[in-house]
Amino acid sequence: MGLRAAGVTVATSFLLGILFTHWIADSLTLWQSPLTDDHLRTAAIYYSAFATQPQWMTWVLLGVTGIGATSLLASFRDGEAGNVMFDGASIFLYICTIYIYWSSVVPNLSEVFLRPLPQTPSSDVPFPDDLRQPTIELASSHLICSVALTGVLLLQAGRAFAEEEDASEKAEDEAEERKQLERQRRSSEGARGRKRPQDEDEAAAVSVPARKSPSARRKDIKATAPRAGSSSSSSVGRSAGSRIRRPS
């Protein structure tokens, strides 16, 4: 995640920096009113110098563009809805930037401004008509590419913010789950602790017979008293009969 975000941010910022350097000429053709031949001439001289840059600078530009596109495409392997939304829009803007730059900027630089400009030492000489439209188109294309790449950076910042919010919510949910598990564990331990003394009391009640009340004991005594009297009288009768039968 960190490497992917760094690749997208660095590549997009690098391309934006290159486009911002064209503001020297673009501001004269887009934001200066009225548009004069001197403004167009200054912009054309700048574009001509940029078109004659060394070849290795072009390869560096292509390499950085490839790094940004690869970093954006690599984000689809996550498969999350938020990533698809933010990165899908970023890839759309990135592809639009590449298309506009390849279809408008590159042909104008290579076909129009790569050749030597006509010598116009005096400001009284009008600006060539065949260079007017390409100069204005270059400025417009640079502006569109700058806006699109700025949108890419904003979308990536939105994705980072959304991921941070999701991470914080996930951490809060995990903490709440741990608290619930802890409460359930404590409640189960408390229930087991209350059940053990109750079981011990029930076992003691079963092993030790319950004491009878005084009224119950008196009833038992009354019930056993006649039995004792009858048994004593029967024993006395048997002793007296034995005495009678004994010969004198």
Image (cartoon, rainbow, N blue to C red):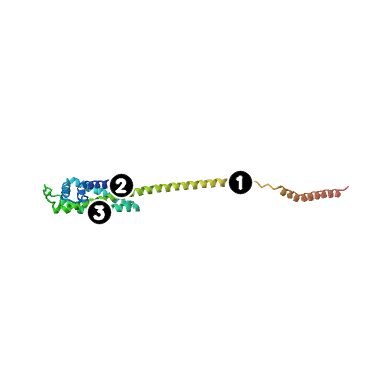
Q: Residues within 10 Å of mark 3 (few under 14, many from 20)?
A: some
Label 2 element class: helix
Does residue 176 appear in the picture of this structure? yes
Whole-percent x, y for residue 156 in the image: 31, 49
Residues under numbered marks 1 and 3 in contact, where contact means CB atoms less than 8 Å apart: no
Label 3 element class: helix
Q: Going 39% across and 47% down the picture, which residue do you hit?
A: 168
Closer-to-camera residue (206/105)? 105
Does residue 80 appear in the picture of this structure? no
Q: Going 24% across and 49% down the picture, which residue do you hit?
A: 65
Residues under numbered marks 1 and 2 in contact, where contact means CB atoms less than 8 Å apart: no
Among the two numbered marks 1 and 2 on one chain, the one whose residue lies closer to the N terminus: 2
Q: Going 56% across and 46% down the picture, which residue do you hit?
A: 194
Q: Residues within 10 Å of mark 1 (few under 14, many from 20)?
A: few
The numbered dot on residue 87 is: none
Q: Residue furthest right?
A: 248
Q: Amino acid at mark 3?
A: Cys
- Side (left or right) of 144 relative to 121: right
Residue linked to disc 3:
96
Whole-percent x, y for residue 56 in the image: 18, 45
Among the two numbered marks 1 and 3 on one chain, the one whose residue lies closer to the N terminus: 3
Q: Amino acid at mark 1?
A: Asp
Nearer the observer, disc 1 or disc 2? 2
- Side (left or right) of 119 relative to 139: left
Q: Going 35% across and 48% down the picture, which residue do you hit?
A: 161
Q: Amino acid at mark 2?
A: Ala
Residue linked to disc 1:
201
Q: CA distance from mark 1 to mark 3?
A: 83 Å
The numbered dot on residue 5 is: 2
